[in-house]
Image: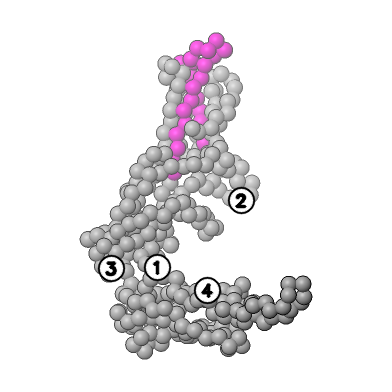
Amino acid sequence: MPNSEFKKPTDSKEEIKLDSALIYADWRQGAAYTGYGASFEVVTVFVGNGAKIEITGKSEKGKKLGKIKGTIDSNRYIGHLDIPSDTEPGDLAYFEVKLSANGIDGESSRIPVRPAPVVTNMAWSAKEARRGDTLKLTADVDKVEPGTEATVTILEYDNDGAHDKIVELPAVIKDKKLEVEWEYVYHEDVDELPTSEEVKRYGASYNPPEYFFVIDINGFRSGTKQESGILAFKDYIEISLRNADGNPRADEKYVLHLPDGSKKEGRLDARGKAREEGVPPGHVRVEFPDMKQVNQGGQD
């Protein structure tokens, strides 16, 4: 650790030397998978931004895992080493760290080399979700030991790739299957979702909340290209209409102008009410054409 011992009185000046040091060099995952990259992190102190660093990957059985040269930023370096496909399962992977200008070198911990998991048939139990629905997320998983723990992360899809994490769910792989349940709840105000009319002026299109999931098995991730398929959020709207005396307007015709630019028509029941299921989430404009007036409405 750096030398920071003061020896003079506190009312006098003293110049001390802060030594550079390697805090730790470690893998960011519990195993290295053949044919894929393994992420690592190096943390230092007092080496200075731009300090040159060299990483050399190795295995206990003498397999070369590549060499990386880079620079330290804010006393940290994050990278990954590719694990060759012919690396022997059961071998142990590690890497050596060298910062020559700072006189620092070190070595990481060991992680086991394993065959890459084979994850297929990632799927939702439905293509659309409504508030309170319980969805089942499934996948077939091979090349892993029974009882292996995994993490399922549900992300809200973004066209620009800036996907937001919604929740992480623990799972256990049994009989080459992964299965987990998730109750869908939408917490935001749907009236704040831009409608088709609002975004088309910017050359964009209506983009309701949509979701996909990824599976992490001890650092091996599957589903980042939306292999699970996209889950769409479908909402509902309730309509109630009364006259000036407070009496229901039975059998009144209505037209819904939906946020995706489409329309839906119907009639109120004898109580002056209606409920439309499966509508796109967002601000809805309700029109009663026979009354020659327009009302504004949002989804509950």
In terms of sequence position, does the residue under pointer 1 or pointer 4 come before the other?
4
Neighbor class of circle 2 (other Cα within 10 Å; few <14, some 14-19, many 20+) is few
Q: Amino acid at mark 3?
A: Val
Residue under the point 26% across and 67% down: 145
Which x, y percent locates residue 167? Answer: 43, 52
Q: Amino acid at mark 4?
A: Ile
In terms of sequence position, does the residue under pointer 2 or pointer 4 come before the other?
4
Magenta-tinted stretch: 233-261
Instruction: Tell me: residue 190, above or below residue 255.
Output: below
Tell me if residue 35 can be seen: no
Neighbor class of circle 1 (other Cα within 10 Å; few <14, some 14-19, many 20+) is some
Q: CA distance from mark 1 to mark 4?
A: 15 Å
Q: Are marks 2 and 1 in contact (CB under 8 Å)?
A: no
Label disc, if present, on residue 219 of the rendered structure: 1
Determine the secondary structure under disc 4: strand
Residue under the point 53% across and 39% down: 190
Q: Are marks 1 and 3 in contact (CB under 8 Å)?
A: no
Q: CA distance from mark 2 to mark 4?
A: 38 Å
Instruction: Tell me: residue 138, above or below residue 197.
Output: below
Which x, y percent locates residue 20? Answer: 60, 81
Neighbor class of circle 4 (other Cα within 10 Å; few <14, some 14-19, many 20+) is some
Please name the residue that numbered disc 4 is placed on.
78
Q: Amino acid at mark 1?
A: Gly
Q: CA distance from mark 1 to mark 3?
A: 13 Å
The part of the image, by quadrant, that contains residue 59 is bottom left
Please name the residue that numbered disc 3 is placed on.
144
Q: CA distance from mark 3 to mark 2?
A: 46 Å
Q: CA distance from mark 3 to mark 4?
A: 27 Å
Label disc, if present, on residue 203 of the rendered structure: 2
In this view, the mark in front (2 or 4): 4
